[in-house]
Image: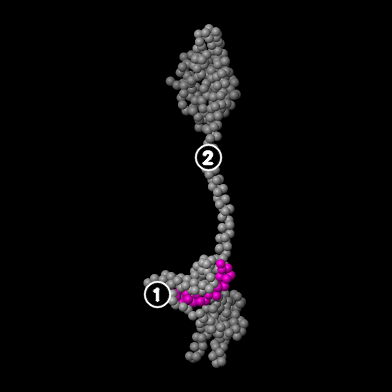
Amino acid sequence: MMTTEEFKQNILGLQPRLQRTAEGIVGDPDSAADAVQEAVITLWEQRATLKAQDMERLSLTIVKRRSIDMLRKQKPTVSIDTEQLMQWEVPDEDPLEERYQLARKLVDQLPERQRNAILMKYEKGLSNKEIERATGMSSTHLYATLSRAYKALRNAMIQNKEE
Amino acid sequence: MKEENEITEEVRELLDSLEQHGANARRQKELSDLIDSLAAGTSLRAKHRRLYPIWWIVGAAAACLLLWLLARPTFKETPNMNEEILVEEIGVKDTIQKENETIEESVILEEPVPKKLLAEETPIKTKKTQNQSTIIKPTPKAVEENFVEPQLVENTAIESTKPEPTDTSNIGSNPIPNVVEEPIAVQSPHRRVIRSLNLVCYECQKEPEYVPQAMIEDRTIFGQLQDPNMKNGSWAFEVKLY
């Protein structure tokens, strides 16, 4: 029987692919996340008989089925080709990964205050008010800082293109 | 201008990728928490499973207690009934003893009446008749031998049934007082006792010298305490039934 830690490691490793698969079927990231969570619960209940090598295949199948069910609930009048959707495979590599790496590289070059503001806003998903509270900046100061950060990123992109 | 727009678009895409990556990280965190809670839930269920035997015992004990509580009222009733029966039995025993005494002393005692047999107009049935049948009607030989005794018995009875009017201190102390009745010779045939009201009625051609006090009980028929004045005899009732 798989331990909790093993199960968690396997699932968290598969999560980006499962999310992309669900998102590809449902089209909505939040609904896709729900489908993944439901699939994880189903897998947890079956973990007594679950093998690590079968986990990816089984989890993808469950996520696809859950996503199709969700799609049926969301669009009951639209005909869904279940067979085709079940056959559909998402690429293993995340296309956003390359762009994320570049963004992270450019952001890291920014001054500390600008970097913190950008990471808090985009990566952590905090609102402007929350950032103001966390950094102690005023709204005008934050607005100015973010503007400067965007300008610096644009310049960095131009430099990156030229290289 | 176009290039600037493209760069701006590229910067936006970069920032979107940052945003998506952040959202994905948050989802992973949620998933991790979900797995932890699932693991905690199963461990909690296992703990509950360990507790099941204890709950079974507690449940069985509670059921037994409930049954005992349900069966208890029936138990409660029986002592009261026994009490009543005991009272009656004691009364009967007393009467038997008295009866034996009356046979010897020819004192006429009234049959004990159970407490709850009230609210009825009942004519008095004294033991006199029975006693007379047993005592006064002996065999011819016995009549000759014990010829003097019945008369003596009657005389003593008359003397004994005349209670002193001033002595009323003991009235009410006995829950079922054995009223000492007058002998049949003195009693009129129309005499009636209304036990529910503790009243005695006399209808005599020749008025008796003394009206025996009514049988007074501690409580009325409605279960209320009697007026203490009743016990002192200041309240005397005499009802004539025609």
Toward the bottom, the furthest residue is: A162
Magenta residues?
A1-26
Query: In this rendering, is residue B195 above or below A125?
Result: above
Q: Give how far apart the Cα atoms at labels 2 and 1 are.
A: 72 Å
Q: Residue at point 46% right, 78% down?
A: A89
Residue type indicated by callout 1: Asp
What label does residue A81 carry, if any? 1
The chain ID associated with circle 1 is A
Image location of residue B118, percent across then percent down: 49, 28
Instruction: Give the x, y percent position of residue A27.
Output: 45, 76
Extreme top residue here?
A: B144
Nearer the observer, B74 or B53: B53
Residue B16 seen in the current view: no
SS at mark 2 in the image:
helix
Q: In front of the other: label 2 or label 1?
A: 1
Residue B89 higher or lower than B187, as above or below: below
Please give the name of the residue rendered at 39% of the width and 74% of the height, measured from the top-left corner: A80
In the rendered image, is residue A124 in sight? yes
Query: Same chain, marks 2 and 1?
Result: no
Residue that label 2 marks: B73
